[in-house]
Image (cartoon, helix red, strand yellow):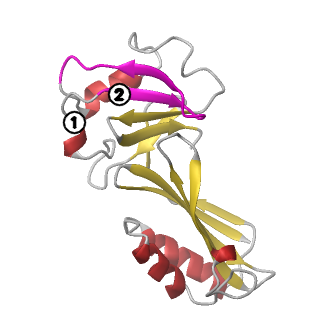
Amino acid sequence: MSQHTLITKKAGCRIRISIGWDRPLQGYFMNIWQLAPNCTEQLLYESLSDPTLNKHGHTDNLDDFVTKLEELRIPGDHLDAVLESVYLDGVFNEGNRVVDHTRYITINESLKGLASEVSDQLAWPAEATGCSDLNIFASNGQLVHTVRPSVEWSDQNLRATLAEDSPQLPADLLCSRQAIHVFLGPEWIASTGL
């Protein structure tokens, strides 16, 4: 079985797509999760539960999944390259292949965010700037820390605030084994363990 992963964003929420070729069952599969506001991943789509696919939740036509992605209004950033790679896995009957297609920006040793499409800056919309609070949540949805900005956010001061030696963060926050998720207002910015 091959597995291709892409993390993208939809309306400020992190979306994780897992799609691939199942060599033993000779079909394509796809699952999609959304990071909910309570910091749990909610399953948005699972091909295994899709009654329009075969009894194993597979299809031999990736257009079925393109249609589903369009129905869910999942942004198309990088999806063409992912779908082409998955298609080729089926053509060559690939198995045991794992590929992460996500463009990350490393903020510090443990924290990563998505890269902007046009630069090596964090991907976050202009409307999330201003003086929105920077909220850090534990994976159980508990708010563990808030940073109230003294100036308008920029890529540079956001990265400085999230640096491991930042005086604005609790010393042990980024060193703990607990997964954390960072939001700028309602907009997901970064997570540990990506």
Q: Is residue 16 left or right of residue 73?
A: right
Q: Residue at x 32, y 44 (%)?
A: 120
What x and y, as percent, mark residue 133?
A: 31, 26
Q: Where 91 falls versus 130 (above or below)? A: below
Q: Where 37 falls versus 161 (above or below)? A: below
**Is residue 137 in the magenta section?**
yes
Q: Quadrant of the rendered structure where residue 57 is? A: bottom right
Q: Which residue is mark 1?
A: 129
Name the residue furthest right: 24
Q: Is residue 46 left or right of residue 155?
A: right
Q: Which residue is mark 2?
A: 134
Q: Quadrant of the rendered structure where residue 157 is? A: top left
Whether residue 105 is visible, yes or no, is no
What x and y, as percent, mark residue 33?
A: 55, 58
Q: Is residue 49 left or right of residue 84?
A: right
Q: Residue at x 33, y 34 (%)?
A: 184
Which segment is the magenta one? 133-151
**Label 1 vs 2, first from the N-terminus:** 1
Relative depth, front residue between 178 and 154 = 178
Q: State which quarter of the image contains the C terminus.
A: top right
Q: Amino acid at mark 2?
A: Leu
Q: Amino acid at mark 1?
A: Thr
Disc 1: CA contacts within 10 A as few (<14), some (14-19) or many (>=20): some
Relative depth, front residue between 52 and 24 = 52
